[in-house]
Image (tube, rainbow, N blue to C red):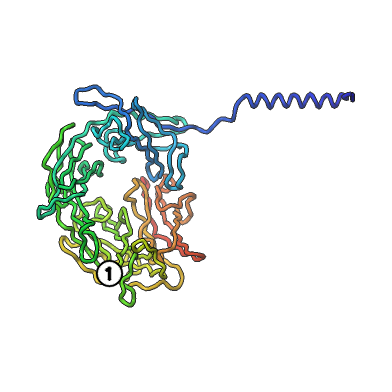
Amino acid sequence: MQRQTRFSRTLAMIAIAATAMVGMLGMAGPAQADTAFSVSGTLTGKPSATAAAVPLAGVRVFLSGTAGNNIGAYAYTDASGHWSISKVNDSSSSASDVPLTAGTYAVQFNCNDANSGSCNHDYVVEYLGHTFQSSDSTKVTLTSANPTATADDELARGAAVSGTVTTATGGAVAGAYVSANPKGGFSNAYTTTAADGSYTLDQLATANEVISADFTDYVHRDEHGFPVTYSTQWFNHAATESAATPLTLVPSATKAGIDFALSVAPSVIGRVVDAAGNGVPALGMDPLRFDPATDQFVSPNSGPYDTNDQGYFKLTGNPGFSLDQGVAQYKLLFSDYLGNDNGKPQTRTPFETTWYHDASSFDDATVITLPTSGNTDLGTVTVVPHTGALRFIGNPVIQDSQSQDGSLTINGDAPSPGTATRTAQWNRNGTPISGATTFFYAPTAADQGTVLTVTVTAKLGAETATATSAGYNVPSEK
């Protein structure tokens, strides 16, 4: 047996000590984890006006970010009315089940769901704080110092209305959309009519409810093949929400006789043609409507609206907007996305983007006015195949967002051809803002008193083109 020297014995002792130290470190556990954020609560409701509140099972709880935050998540209450959310989905990055982070959130409670158990449509859809809009609700705020929050609530019992929807000539309207919202608020309850035009709409608030009905007939079409759209009507036979008669309702009771008689909506029609006069199918038309409240032309909540197989387009009533109709004014953008014509994708050379009528920019586009009755024919809009370099038809415009409180958005960016992809970069006093690369931007304290611009970059194959907006002056209190 080989004998150890004093030096080798010393090395062995050091090795044993090191091994023991590693073991003790392992026993101490992993390094401290990141802060775990969560929001939880308990929901109750009264089965009747005089009953005690009981837990509500199966209520859908939706947690959403505010001020441009694109995250959201939902959970359902259990048998004891309890719910908890610690993971969310981020629509800006398409990420799902990511840990909840510090921030401010709105919480909505909804019994109008297939999994709604004990709710049974007896309670209103509301936000924390008993409001019907996110902007008015009580928010929960998570910080590293306070990573958890509690959002308990007792849901209010709802009321109901019933009635019949007919055409102006008295014919029953099956499939009409009937909705309700607090006066000046957004729709939070809806239903559709039965074959005889009848309906019952529940989960309504008890004060200042405004009821409306609208209908699009996909069975009977006009001479150009478009569905027949009827103008939205508010109770009691009002043409705008501001003229509607609000209802005061009784919880757990149904108010009958809320009837509607709908008329065909006025419209603007036209046809997109090529140089030979042939109709161009599946070419996108974006109607930007003037909003008097913000003094700006705003994009619709849906679209674009493609030309049909004969190249016709039709603008009816109030597409994609939640605004009073009044005198509706629009600017129209025609852009070729090479869409589908009856399921068949287009293989043509894309046409040049154009503002109506042959305008060089969003600002210069011709304003058209929707008639109060009947139809206005704009005639033809001639488009030509794209040639030359990728470019923008005018510069983008910064506007206040209609969909995200406290945020700015981009409008009027029109690359030609429309098949180009687009990215955005927001700038502060001419310097790019790190991470501000979406089409929405929520100004921060660092932006107060500065000038914001946004640069949109279009890309098509190896080609790129850029366009930068005019400056947006951020007030000191923004």
Answer whether residue 416 is visible to the viewer in this image: no
| Label 1 crowd (10 A; few <14 / some 14-19 / many >=20) | many
Residue 165: x %, y % from top left = 15, 48
Residue 422: x %, y % from top left = 44, 59
Q: Nearer the viewer, residue 1 or 462?
A: 1
Q: Amino acid at mark 1?
A: Arg
User: Relative to 277, does residue 197 appear above or below in the rendering?
Assistant: above
Identify which residue is drawn at 31% across, 41% down. 135
Residue 208: x %, y % from top left = 17, 39
Answer whether residue 453 is visible to the viewer in this image: yes
Q: Give the mark count.
A: 1
Q: Considering the image in quadrants, where does the N terminus appear?
A: top right
Q: Is residue 242 left or right of residue 101?
A: left
Q: Nearer the viewer, residue 337 or 207?
A: 337
Q: Nearer the viewer, residue 208 or 167?
A: 167
Which image quarter: residue 375?
A: bottom left
Q: Is residue 158 left or right of residue 301?
A: left
Q: Residue furthest bottom?
A: 276
Query: SS of the residue at dot 1?
Result: strand
Which image quarter: residue 56?
A: top left
Residue 166: x %, y % from top left = 13, 50
Q: Residue furthest right?
A: 2
Query: Pointer 1: what residue?
Result: 271
Identify which residue is drawn at 38% across, 34% down. 75
Q: Is residue 272 left or right of residue 443?
A: left
Q: Nearer the viewer, residue 327 or 174?
A: 174
User: Relative to 77, does residue 322 appear above or below in the rendering?
Assistant: below
User: Relative to 246, does residue 451 appear above or below in the rendering?
Assistant: below
Q: Residue furthest top?
A: 52
